[in-house]
Each structure stands twice: as C-alpha cells, then as structure tokens.
Amino acid sequence: MSTAALMDVNNGFYNNLDDSVIFRVEITVIGELESVTSANAYLVDSEHKYTLQNSLISLMYDAELSDTTIEVGNEVFNVHKSILCSRSSVFRAMLCKGNFSEAQCGTIKLQDVSADIVRELIYFIYTDMLSPSFNLEENVVPLFAASMQFEIKGVTKICENVFINKLNIDNAIQVLKVADTYSSKSLKDQVFQFIAQNAQSIKKQKDFLELEGDLLQETNIVLEFSFRRNGCSIDSGDKRHVCTIS
C-alpha cells in the first residue's frame, strides 16, 4: 500500500484527530492448535517446594542476615531494613532519613505498643498475613492503632473488616470512637452509615448519650439526616436530636 493511500482518511486507516494510524489484522489458523503447557505445571508439588512466603518466614527468624533491630521494652526483634522500608512509609522515613536517630544507629525503640503487637506487625510485613496463633478479635484495637501509626495498610484493612463484621447497636459508638481516635476515615464513614440506618436505636444507647464535642456534632448531623429522611421532626433544643414521628 502506498503512503498516500495509507494517509487518506477516506480509507479508514489514518485518524487526523490524534495523528494515529489504525491497523486491522485478521489471523487465520490452518490446522490444529498445539496446546502449550505452562511452566508452572512443572513445579514440584507443594509438599516439597520452597515458596517465597516460606523463604521470607525463614528470613524473619534468621538473625544472622538482619541489619536492623526493633526494641520494645526488654524484647528485641532482628529485622531487615529493606523489607521494613518497602512495606511501611513510616519505617522508611525512620531508617532512611539522616535526621532520624534510627537511621544512624539502625535501632528502632518503640513505646506505647506491646511486644506482641509489634511481633504481629513484623509477621505481616514479612508474610502478608497474620500469624495463625494470633487472636485477632481480642487484639483488634491495639493492632489497628499500631497499623495506623506505622501505615501498614494491609493490617489496617483486616482490622477494619473485623470492626464492620462485628458492628452492632451496642458497640457502634465505641467503634466510632476508635475510628475517630486513629483518624480512619474509611472506618468512620462505614460506622456512620450503620448509625444512619439504625438511628432510632442508636440515640437510646448510653454511649451515644455520653458523646461530647466534635464527634457528637458529627453524629448529630448523621442522625438528623436519617430522621428527616424517615419523616421525623427534630427537637432543635435537644443537642442529641430527639426524633418524633410526624
């Protein structure tokens, strides 16, 4: 085909709006298709193979190759700087910024967090999962707090899922307080959605009656929206929004 024919917009190949050339290719296969076996099919069975995850677990427990330590009280965790930095922007700032003492000495000293929670964070950092023996439901609040502090988003998401799956009338305000304390917008939005759907019951809860400040104001806005949507009148003199069916 000549260049002139290719560039002629009437032939449908050249688009002068974005200066592109369009080709349509039709492929005809003659004969039978030969199946191609994936390379993964030749891997040894799972009982005998070393996976990346297994190797990282081994590395996690191997102090010989570690180059950084995390100290929590009397407990010391031997870790690897490159892995920590690749999984947490907070650890990266601590270990890679020259103006942080951790970057100079290779030791991170943590306070206000338990050794058990730090151990679990490290396990997740290396394996992308929580350890089988960890009791998540009993420790979800401190784990959530630590995940927010060190910006380990995978752990944060797991904890948020636990909060939402266990959310009910009795604990909604408590979960809301947790979301507000640790500035989790995604969790807070989901709790507010639940509160809006259960406004009549929530406003009778003791935890709601004890709310104060900005969080009370935010919750009132959600309740007011829910009440008006359901045809309720609001007692404007009550800062906790008593609703009466009109």
Image: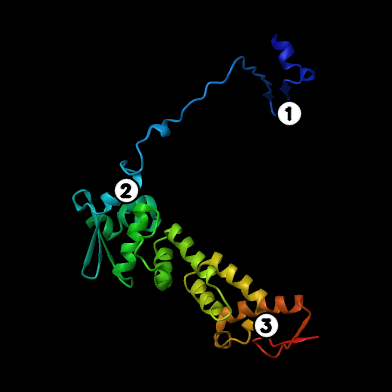
Disc marking residue 200? 3
Separation (CA) of disc 3 from disc 2: 51 Å
Residue linked to disc 2: 54
Q: Could you tell me which secondary element the residue under label 2 belongs to?
A: helix
Residue linked to disc 1: 17
Would you identify the image quadrant in which residue 77 lies?
bottom left
Q: Could you tell me which secondary element the residue under label 1 belongs to?
A: loop
**3 vs 2, front mark:** 2
What's the residue type where badge 1 is placed? Leu
Viewer-side residue, 112 vs 78:
78
**1 vs 3, front mark:** 3
What's the residue type where badge 2 is placed? Asn
Depicted 223 relative to depicted 34: above or below: below
User: In the displayed structure, does residue 105 sit left or right of residue 94?
Assistant: left
Quadrant in which the N terminus appears: top right
User: In the displayed structure, does residue 79 sit left or right of residue 203?
Assistant: left
Q: Residue 30: horizontal and vertical position, in percent?
A: 62, 14
Q: Can I make out residue 80 in this image?
A: no
* Label located before the other in sequence (2 or 1): 1
Q: Could you tell me which secondary element the residue under label 3 belongs to?
A: helix
* Label located before the other in sequence (3 or 2): 2
What's the residue type where badge 3 is placed? Gln
